[in-house]
Amino acid sequence: MPGLNDRALGWLRFIWDKATTPDDWSDQGEPHPWWDRYTAPPMCSFPRFDLHYMSYVLPVMLEATPAWREVYTRISDELVRRYTSFWGAVDWCTLIGPDPGADRYPPAWQTFIPEPLRGRYTVPGWTGNGLEPWGLQPDPVGADGNVFYRGWLNLLLGIRRYVSGEATEHQSLDITGYQNRQFTWTHARIAEFISAQFRSRPQGPHCENTKIWPFCVSAAGLGLKLYDAQLGTTLSEPFPRWIDYLRRHYMSLTRSGELRTFALYYDPMEQRLHSMPGPSVAHGVFPCLLYLYPQDREFALWIYELAMRRLGWSDPDLSLSRLHADPNHLSTAMWMAHEVEDTATEDRIRDFIESEFQPRFFGEENDRFAFWFGYDSTWPRGQVNATLMLVESGSPGAWWRIFNDSRLASASEPRLHGVDYPNIGIRRAQNDMAHRVLSIETTGATPSRRGQPTSFTIDQLPGPAEVSVTVDNQDSTGWLVTGSDSIRLDLTIGDHQIRVAFPGGSSRQSSPRT
């Protein structure tokens, strides 16, 4: 498995900054402006969306560094802490009842509302806690609606468990709800609640009150699948029935087999499905692909091909220049093409993205990386970057493997601990248990610290006094035994190739310091 490239390392450096820099997500504060509250208004312009999108790259990166998890765990913890705060559920806590401005929406928002209802219907993004027949429900997790809040929280918690390897599903979580009331949940209870909703609602739970979104429901299903994959449960069992419901009720084809409708959302109270008109119908598909593909590969590939054909994006003779105004969906198309090894499409979209989406390193030491997408902003947009960084950070099929075929290091294999990140970075850390070798590639994550001394621990080693260590193909004596299963490795910050052979391997032994 190759190591993380420079772009992936630069994105990791930036999301570390975002996660570990203190800011106030209580009702008395406000998130730092680098949290993406700007993309895809009025539906997704809440900082919570940046939190869960930011987490997706962590298990993908872990494929390159399965023996080094602590940085991903720390980031995940900071994301969960914010997600369960007031600002995590700010829409559920503040957008109460009918929207008094429903007759004054800007023209750009009207396209998200069925034409006969415009002027008297609540736009997507207005959660409407308190609307009848459900009434005011203070708990953002335990409500009838708000599945997009708890569904993505469940997925985020699953990712946290995955990258840490720790059994945290029964640890208590305090969730901030309406008027700062606190509600105690666990990962296990959230997953069970979502599963029960799927069983009782074949059409799917709703997000904003009155609206069922395939986008949100698909994400809720993926969180259940990840939970089952790690704990051996069957909570995702009802989800294939919902995919069948989607196929029969939330989309349709023309007589010639082209995509005619695909629901942005369905309103069971109005009994109305809202689909974008013309070729824009395909834009209902793209947000679902990331979540549907690991759950039903065949169905996701089918709707991906329908959407690409409807937009003409699969036509090699079509210019992509007109697509610059919609980076979200083109970024998803790029990710999907990469994931399924549709190399012709990936290469074609990549050429456009490289020339138009402004990839660049930034920061005081030019060690952070992101795409700017033509936005005039101080900070890169987190939501759109998150999708493209899956391509930069993982090989084809990486996203599918997380949920279906994970072969990461077990909890008992040798691992790195106490790495002085972000001064030194880890490009690759992988065990070859057949040959009893741990291979590590380091880099100077903070360039100004290159050449300075550093150290980290490698633990869970069998017979640590018997290991051999090479650094940059030279036998090393810069290590010492620190415990019954651990050594400390001393080196300088920078680019190094490290090989640690432990008992059962075939390498020569070098002598540790004592």
Image (cartoon, grey):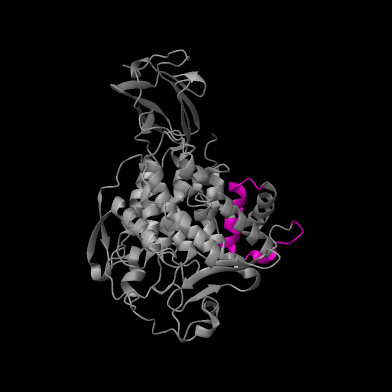
Q: Classify 125 as above or below 235.
A: below
**Quadrant assignment for the C terminus:** top left
Q: Classify 231 as above or below 212.
A: above
Q: Nearer the viewer, residue 232 or 54?
A: 232
Q: Classify 117 as above or below 441.
A: below
Q: How many marks?
A: 0
Q: In the current view of this chain or complex, which residue is farthest to the right?
A: 317
**Residue 64 x/y as whole percent:** 49, 37
Q: Nearer the viewer, residue 257 or 78?
A: 257
> Image check: 315 left or right of 398?
right
Residue 93 within the magenta-colored segment of the rendering: no
- Can residue 72 be seen from the camera position used here? no
**Residue 329 x/y as whole percent:** 58, 61
In the image, the segment drawn in magenta is 316-342
Q: Classify 476 as above or below 399.
A: above
**Residue 272 x/y as whole percent:** 50, 76
**Quadrant assignment for the N terminus:** top right
Residue at point 53%, 49% (across, down): 390
- Can residue 392 be seen from the camera position used here? yes
**Residue 298 x/y as whole percent:** 58, 51
Residue 321 within the magenta-colored segment of the rendering: yes
